[in-house]
Image: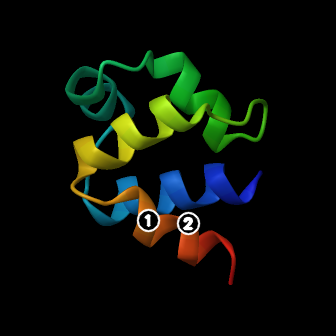
Amino acid sequence: MTNFGRLVRELREYKDMTLTQVAEKSGVNEATINNWENGVYTPTVNNYEAVLNAMGFALEVTIKEINK
């Protein structure tokens, strides 16, 4: 799993949201988010930001977390 995928999963679970909920709120396909979480793909910046915003997080904060 990539750092991006790991963080998306951790944040989604922290917010107690399902993949379906995040997908509906962000407009990003559920299968796409699932592929990130499983390390199949790395997200585009726009899609990643949309998913983070849907969960109530800012892109800038999560980039700092990934770089730890």
**Residue drawn where x is 76% and y is 52% of the image:** 2
Q: Quadrant of residue 44?
A: top right
Where disc 1 sits, the SS reads helix
Residue 45 percent location from the top left of the image: 55, 37
On screen, 22 above or below 62?
above
Task: Reply above or below: 7 against 41.
Answer: below
Q: Position of residue 4 (x, y in %)?
A: 64, 53
Viewer-side residue, 36 vs 13: 36
13 sits to left or right of 67: left
In front of the other: 38 or 48: 48
Q: Is residue 29 left or right of residue 3?
A: left
Q: Which mark is residue 60?
A: 1
Q: How does the figure colour the protein chain or chains?
A: rainbow
Which quadrant does the C terminus fall into? Answer: bottom right
Residue 48: percent from left, percent from top: 49, 39
Q: Amino acid at mark 1?
A: Glu
Q: What residue sits 47% from the left and 30% below the top?
A: 47
Residue furthest to the bottom in view is: 68
Residue flagged by tag 2: what amino acid is it? Ile
Q: Which residue is mark 2?
A: 63
Q: Under tag 2, what secondary structure? A: helix
Decide: marks 1, 2 in contact (CB < 8 A)? yes
**Along the horizontal axis of the image, is 54 left or right of 37?**
left
